[in-house]
Image: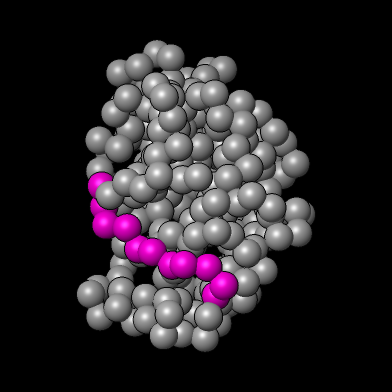
Amino acid sequence: MQLTKYGHACVRLDQDDRRLVIDPGGLTDPAALNGASAVLVTHEHFDHFSESALRAAAAADPALEIWTNTAVAARLEGLGNRVHRVGEGDAFTAAGFEIQVYGAWHAVIHPDIPRIANIGFLVDGRVFHPGDALTVPDRPGLPGLEALLLPVHAPWSTIGHLVDYVREIAPHHAYAIHDGALNDTGTAMVGGLLGEHGPGIGAPYTRLTTGATVAVG
């Protein structure tokens, strides 16, 4: 499996001729969707979901299918049975990848800000994208988890939260996502604290540049 990082929270997974894209939002080049076989969307925030980009991709490829929560699906009215509503506990196959859904809610930003739905996707038991939450799937230690896609910069978390989260998940590798608002100084600071000079997260930490690809597994 090949993992490619795109803007902010978006990644693409390729295996053979299958291509799965997760969270192509407003901070992502719509070209990330080129050739996609299927798309997963964790929640409705603009940095994870671009209605215009998804509608354009669906118009360009009548075979493209999308899996997401009810709120996002409601905004894609007109695409019919190409849009699949899923929630916590569901399992399905998308582009030949086996997907399990974990989590139900976006992390709390502030008690005065209403929470929205957010779901995380575990792909082939090897790659986990939590969206905007530090969801721990009910599989202690997640045996075999190759890659945790770690949201490293958000108004709802601290570095301390991230350290404890990675330790609890215990992946083979943590890859940064949700970093589109970081400048060079912030990127270096986060990398220092989550890397070998920090308190230790129990896994190698890597921030891929946009367009960079790594092999998973």
Q: Which residues are magenta?
A: 201-211
Q: Main secondary structure of the magenta part?
A: loop
In terms of image quadrants, where is residue 191?
bottom left
Horizontal and vertical percent position of residue 149: 49, 56
From the viewer's perspective, is residue 57 above or below residue 118?
A: above
Front one among 49 and 76: 49
State the residue lying farthest toward the top. Answer: 62
* Residue at x-position 41% and y-position 85%: 197
From the viewer's perspective, is residue 6 above or below residue 40?
A: below
Front one among 200 and 108: 200
Residue 133 placement, left or right of 38: right
Q: How is the image coloured?
A: one colour
* Residue at x-position 58% and y-position 45%: 126
From the viewer's perspective, is residue 40 above or below residue 203?
A: above
Is 101 a magenta residue? no
* Residue at x-position 72% and y-position 36%: 90
Q: Is residue 140 visible?
A: yes
Horizontal and vertical percent position of residue 62: 40, 13
* Residue at x-position 56% and y-position 17%: 81
Front one among 22 and 79: 22
Horizontal and vertical percent position of residue 172: 55, 59
